[in-house]
Image: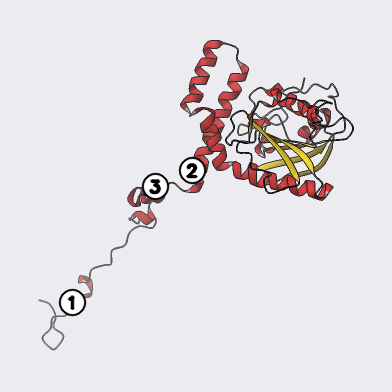
Amino acid sequence: MAEEDGQGTPKTSKKAKREPLRRPRGKRGGIKNRKDKSSTSAKVTGEKPTKAKTTAMHATQIALFHTLEKKLAQTQDEKERAVILQQQEALGGLQAYQDASLFGGDKQRGGETGKWCAQQLMEIRGKEKLRLLDVGALSGTAYDKYDWIDTISIDINPRNDHVLRYDFFDYPTPTKSNGENFDVVALSLVVNFVGDLADRGRMLLHAHKYLPDDKRGLLFLVLPLACVQNSRYCDHARLRAILASCGWGNVVRQHDSARLTHWLCEETSKKWDGKVWKKEEIKKGVSLNNFCIIVR
């Protein structure tokens, strides 16, 4: 029988008390404690992908397009080229690539890079009127805020009416009769897009043709930071040497942001010095990328 407490009420034995339910540490249930709580929460609540995830998806799409563009430049086999072009179309083609660039890169190209370039030019020359050729301009808005910069924008697939449809190598060079020289040629996030590694070097040389003969013009070059920070074939020192070899020996300003590397260079020569720059491995590592510039 149960022992009474003196008032006729049975007393509960200490041994009979139920022990509290304890779960092992790290084994708690519920959505908030699951390792995949973000994906589960998104399924339950119907959340849209975060900006970070969307940016990552666009970055992946851009990387795939770049890889195919490089393969396209490296083959002359018509069947292989047709397959690569089909793969690009499956990704949405150049239009989709540019859409992805506009999402993640136009703020950089048209905001961050244009702003940085304008600030450096203002510090160097004040608000002196100058002409700038913006290559690969997409929507052509990079220098809209700066009325002292007269900008001509070109792109192989313009995203705005005022952007001229041209490949950089096909855009007419100035003549003595028309006097349409530029003070600055901007290659912002363009060189890294070109699949042919030698064409990347040719772009650095070709830029001289748009600058005046009687004074030193400027080249504004922007690349993803990974091109110099995480490449087995390129780093800051090698890029600086390649620029000097191509006639851009005076690096007036250089700046690395979280994602980009900016170079504002003044002409030291109108010609290439003849040094050949091959695809040479200067760093080793499985996680390194293959960005490279060839000059020959």
Structural distance between the alpha carbons of marks 3 and 2: 14 Å
| Residue labelled with disc 2 | 54
Q: Which is more N-terminal, label 1 or label 2?
A: 1
Report the amino acid beneath label 3. Ser
Which sits in the foreground, 241 or 160?
Answer: 160
| Residue 200 in the image, given as x and y percentages of width and height | 71, 26
Q: Are marks 3 and 2 in contact (CB under 8 Å)?
A: no
**Residue of label 3:** 39
Which residue in the rendered view is the most extreme toward the right?
214
Q: Split into 4 quadrants, where in the image is the C terminus?
A: top right
Element at badge 2? helix
Q: Quadrant of residue 250?
A: top right
Q: Is residue 217 above or below residue 85?
A: below
Callout in the foreground (3, 1): 3
Let me know if residue 258 appears in the view.
Answer: no
Q: Which residue is mark 1?
A: 12
The residue depicted at 39 percent of the width and 47 percent of the height is 39
Q: Kindly indicate the quadrant of the structure image that contains residue 63.
A: top right
The answer to whether mark 2 and mark 1 are in CB contact below 8 A is: no
Distance from Cα at disc 3 to Cα at disc 1: 48 Å
Q: Is residue 102 visible?
A: yes
Confirm or deny contact between disc 3 and disc 1 (CB under 8 A).
no
Give the amino acid type for the residue marked by disc 1 in the picture.
Thr
Kind of residue indicated by mark 2: Thr
The structure residue drawn at horizontal position 77% and vertical position 39%, both measured from the top left corner, is 131
Residue beneath the point at 14% across and 88% down: 6
